[in-house]
Image (tube, grey):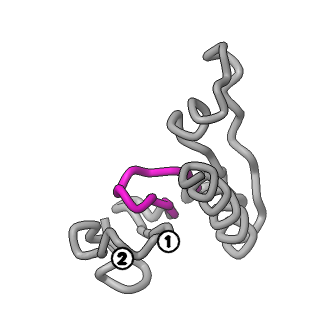
Amino acid sequence: MIAVSNPQESNLTAVPINTGLPTVVTTIDDGGGRRISVFGTDRTEICGAFRPVDCPYWLMYVTKRVVDAVERSQTNLFPRRIQLPTQQDVRQWLELIAGLYMRAANQ
C-alpha cells in the first residue's frame, strides 16, 4: 500500500500511543482503491471508509469493536456500510465516530 499523506501515517509503529487522539491513516492500494482508517490510542481500528476504483462514492463502516461497545445483542444488527459522496464528508464522519467512541471508552 502507498500512503497518500504523511508517510509516517501509514506506519502505525511510528505513531505515538499517548496522544489521546485517534490516528487517521490514508492509503491507496495497488489497484487504485482508496482507504481511510481511524485507529484508537491502542492502535486498534475503530472505523474507516474505502472507495473502490470503479465506485463514485465512499463506503464508510464501523468495526465490530464499536458495535460490541454499544452492546448489540444480535449479530445481524451490524450496521450497513454508509455511502458518502466526498472524502471531506468521510473524514468528518470518521472523526466524529472515533471521537465519540474514545470519549465513551474513557468514562
Q: Which mark is residue 91?
A: none
Which SS type dominates the magenta stretch? strand
Q: As displayed, is residue 22 above or below residue 44?
A: below
Q: As displayed, is residue 45 above or below residue 39?
A: above
Q: As displayed, is residue 73 above or below residue 71?
A: above
How far apart marks 1 and 2 lie (CA) works out to: 13 Å
Amino acid type assigned to the residue bearing label 2 in the image: Glu
| Mark nearer the N terminus (1 vs 2) | 2
**The N terminus lies in quadrant:** bottom left
- Is 77 part of what is drawn in magenta? no
Which residue corresponds to mark 1? 21
From the image, state whether disc 1 or disc 2 is nearer to you: 1
Q: Position of residue 85 (x, y in %)?
A: 78, 64
* Region of the chain picked out in magenta, as a range: 35-49
Q: Are circles 1 and 2 on residues that touch, CB within 8 Å?
A: no
**In the orientation shown, which residue stands out farthest toward the bottom?**
6
**In the orientation shown, which residue stands out farthest toward the front?**
107
Q: Position of residue 37 (x, y in %)?
A: 48, 60
The residue nearer to you, when weighing 41 against 33, is 41
Q: On the rendered structure, is 103 left or right of 32?
A: right
Amino acid type assigned to the residue bearing label 1 in the image: Leu
As helix, strand or loop, the secondary structure at mark 1 comes to loop
Q: As displayed, is residue 9 above or below residue 58?
A: below
Give me the residue at 45% from left, 69% from top. 23
As helix, strand or loop, the secondary structure at mark 2 comes to helix
Give me the residue at 59% from left, 35% from top. 69
Q: On the rendered structure, is 42 left or right of 83?
A: left
The residue nearer to you, when weighing 79 against 21, is 21
**In the orientation shown, which residue stands out farthest toward the left?**
13
- Dot 1: within a 10 Å radius of its alpha carbon, few (fewer than 14), some, or many (20 or more) residues? some
Give me the residue at 73% from left, 70% from top. 86
Which residue corresponds to mark 2? 9
